[in-house]
Image (cartoon, grey):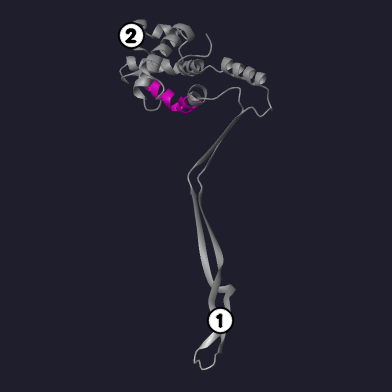
Amino acid sequence: MKNKLKDVVDISTLLSTGFIFKKIQSTHSSTFEWLDSTTAQILDEKLVLEHSGEKIVSRYYKNLIDLEDAEVIPDALTVVANNIATTYADKWNKLHSAMIASDYNPLENYDMEQVETPDVTKEKTIDVKTKMVTSSSGDSSSGVYGFNSPVASPSTENEASTEVTVEGDNEDNVSHDLETETGTRELTRHGNIGVTTSQQMLESEIELRSNNNFILILLNDVSKVLCLSVY
């Protein structure tokens, strides 16, 4: 006689301590960090009471139950949990990351982040030519000697000054101008680049979510292990 899944699962135990998802959550918590105890309990109840309870138990699971009854193995459910974790860990974790954990705007198809960390030193050298100005000034006068006078008396008086300007390479000064640029510049661009209209993107998002329900994927995968694909 073929057993249905609901026939090999004790309902009172299911409602109090769960079933296969609770076993996976307790034995592989580090592998499925997103699977908490409450979610696991809900999934177990949905699996047996709503999704797969009427399905026939697979030969694989039925053999494990017989081995447990014969005390060959201590716990058939632990063996199944290890099997499922090994088979679906990569798939479930990536799906959860893409479908549940990711944060994105379904109406945007362009998202770019650019980070620059400049470490630039600019050095400028300027040669400066100086201008030297020298000047001198003084008085000049001429005189005549009077009769019986040993001292000349001035006859004309001139004031004169001389200024000499020298320009050229008499002194070279070198000026260094040093400029350093450090820090971080961030540029974020996002939006719709116009290839697909916002309406088309929204329709695709709705279709994606309708045809790819994460919870339903988990239930289907576990059901493939525990049950036959036909009723």
Q: Residue at x 60, y 16 (%)?
A: 206
Which residue carries the number 1 mark? 140
User: Does 31 lie within the magenta span?
Assistant: no
Can you see residue 180?
A: yes
**Measured from the top left, where is residue 18 in percent x and y?**
36, 12
Tag count: 2
Q: Which mark is residue 16?
A: 2
Rounded to the nearest angstrom, the CA distance separating label 2 from label 1 is: 126 Å
Residue 185 vs residue 105, the one in the foreground: 185
Q: Give the vertical position of 82 relative to 188 (above or below).
A: above
Tell me the quarter of the picture where residue 83 sits.
top left
Q: Residue at x 37, y 22 (%)?
A: 79
Residue 71 vs residue 130, the one in the foreground: 130
Q: Tell me the quarter of the image containing the N terminus.
A: top left
Q: Give the vertical position of 207 relative to 158 (above or below).
A: above
Q: Residue at x 48, y 9 (%)?
A: 51
Q: Residues within 10 Å of mark 1 (few under 14, many from 20)?
A: few
**Measured from the top left, where is residue 68 in percent x and y?**
33, 17
Amino acid residing under circle 2: Ser
Identity of the residue furthest to the front in this view: 147
**Cβ atoms at labels 2 and 1 below 8 Å apart:** no
* Circle nearer the N terminus (2, 1): 2
Can you see residue 55?
A: no
Amino acid residing under circle 1: Ser
Which stretch appears magenta? 79-94
Residue 91 vs residue 229, the one in the foreground: 91
10 lies left or right of 50: left
User: Does 87 lie within the magenta span?
Assistant: yes
**Measured from the top left, where is residue 69 in percent x and y?**
33, 14
**Measured from the top left, where is residue 220 in percent x and y?**
50, 16
